[in-house]
Image (cartoon, helix red, strand yellow):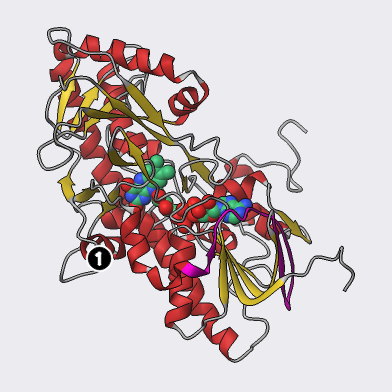
Amino acid sequence: APLAEPVCENTDVVILGAGVAGLTAAQTLQDNGVNNFLVLEARGETGGRLYSHEFAGHTVELGANWVHGPGKADGNINPMWTMVQKANLNTVETNNEEHVLYPADNVKNIAAALEAAGNATDKVFVDAINLLQNNLEDRTYRAGQRLYGWDPRKTDPAEQLADWWYWDWGAASPPEMHSEEDRFVCDEPGFVSALRNTVSSVLDRVRVNNKVTSIKHDLSGVTVTSNNGCVNAKYAIVTFSLGVLQKGDVKFDPPLPDWKAQGIAGFEMATYTKIFLKFPTSFWDKEKFILWADPHVRGNYPVFQPLDLDGLYEGSNILVATVTGERAYRVESQDPEVTKQEIYDILRKMYFDRDVTYPEDIYFANWSKWDWAYGSYSYWPASTSLQEHQNLRANVDSVFFAGEATSQEFFGYLHGAYYEGKHVAEFLAPCIKVNQAGCTEKKYDVLTGVTPYDLYNPDNGWYIKGNGVPGN
Ligand SMILES: Cc1cc2nc3c(=O)[nH]c(=O)nc-3n(C[C@H](O)[C@H](O)[C@H](O)COP(=O)(O)OP(=O)(O)OC[C@H]3O[C@@H](n4cnc5c(N)ncnc54)[C@H](O)[C@@H]3O)c2cc1C
């Protein structure tokens, strides 16, 4: 071949992304007797949004931190819990009720608001299962809460904090997982070590620092181009975050069909930013969650978590603040020194009677900016159908998709990514082994609405369909 022509590597399956979904897919292919595969990863390390990082001499988790719902011995065990136990990582049980409340002069109201919000939330989840199982019209989370008596006043700090706590922060947990405790992972090897141990036999297939820029596809295969060359394969498994798919940095050739583009466009990425702070002294409550009801701004540094609790990083003087959504974008876009000062000012208001010291160091992830993530995790907007979600999940030609966002049950979670990676590999393994073309997953070319057309009638205020408009 002429020298200028790039020679692509050949393999059966090219997995794009080495997060939980990609590495689980790789391991599952191998477990099912498929050995000819490669993993291309943009970053210099594996794990993706399971991201352990050194801060102030300790390993902290920039991304996933909890095993949400470890499961019960007599039921389903969360696969992430199995990994964490095998790796023998230190964890601590948490639940949303282990908190101290600030400001001190508003504690009674905050406690009452938390109780009301919590009660409504429990009922909304039961409701949500009912709507889903019976194919009834969806409603927003807020509509559900109102029906159960929770409609926080916009200018009531206690109610706004309670609302943030049960929605923005905590309650995005799926109903199946809701009643169980959560396990917070805090250990020097890092949460990501549990994943790496589990997939150790496929790690040598991962090519780090390979940022994929285009995916050429047809029914017979794919050509994937990265900053480091190209790979031909029979199948690709794309595990990029929903944010990456939405931003369009990776070109599909031919472009993705409408049903697929619509599936990708219809879902949302949240941003959840943890801010790690190292202090000269530890002056805060030794409690798992310290909540702050800001008198003016909803979600303004509403939760702090000490990492220097007994059994965690004792003596570390590390405090973690979390912000979400608009407040997270603000932190990502302003000078960290400003963030430091803002947090210091709030801590001084909370602990006006203690010796509050100034943070020595600060670090946070730029989830909404990082071009390998563009957000922290996905969520499912109200009134978006299962069909549309399946289209986000389904393959286009030889390109398959897996990741937390493609999980209908556990989107947003590590175990969602795990189950999707496992599913896609189990689906493809037989296709590869018998060299069977046209393996394809369920998709919907047309998404249907829910109101039958004969209900568009004058009784319902609909005059256009042959009935003329009122007064004509
Ligand atoms: C702040 C935060 C807190 C969270 N907390 C929890 C929690 O407590 N519990 C929980 O269960 N879940 C939590 N999650 C969610 C969990 O981390 C994710 O659901 C899970 O890690 C997603 O795995 P994935 O394999 O689907 O995607 P990813 O981990 O995003 O993997 C995709 C991989 O693709 C790579 N990639 C992207 N673009 C390209 C490209 N162009 N070329 C090559 N490679 C590319 C990325 O670098 C990445 O490694 C949290 C997430 C965040 C961000």
Q: Is residue 409 visible?
A: no
**Which residues fall within the magenta stretch?**
204-226
Q: Reply yes or no: does residue 211 show up in magenta.
A: yes
Q: Give the residue displayed 20% in from the left and 12% down from the top.
A: 356
Q: Is residue 288 above or below residue 235?
A: above
Asked where in the image residue 3 lies, by quadrant, the reply is: bottom right
Q: Is residue 77 left or right of residue 421?
A: left
Give 425 or 142, whichever is nearer the viewer. 425
| Residue 355: x %, y % from top left | 15, 10
Q: Secondary structure at mark 1?
A: helix
Asked where in the image residue 360 lies, by quadrant, the reply is: top left
Judging by the rendered image, the residue that carries numbered circle 1 is 82
Give 379 or 9, whichever is nearer the viewer. 9
Q: Give the residue displayed 58% in from the left and 59% down from the top.
A: 392
| Residue 24: x %, y % from top left | 43, 68
Q: Is residue 180 left or right of residue 327?
A: left
Q: Give the residue displayed 55% in from the left and 79% down from the top.
A: 428
Amino acid type indicated by mark 1: Thr
Q: Give the residue displayed 26% in from the left and 19% down from the top.
A: 293
| Residue 127: x %, y % from top left | 32, 50
| Residue 364: x %, y % from top left | 41, 31
Asked where in the image residue 61 lies, by quadrant, the reply is: top left
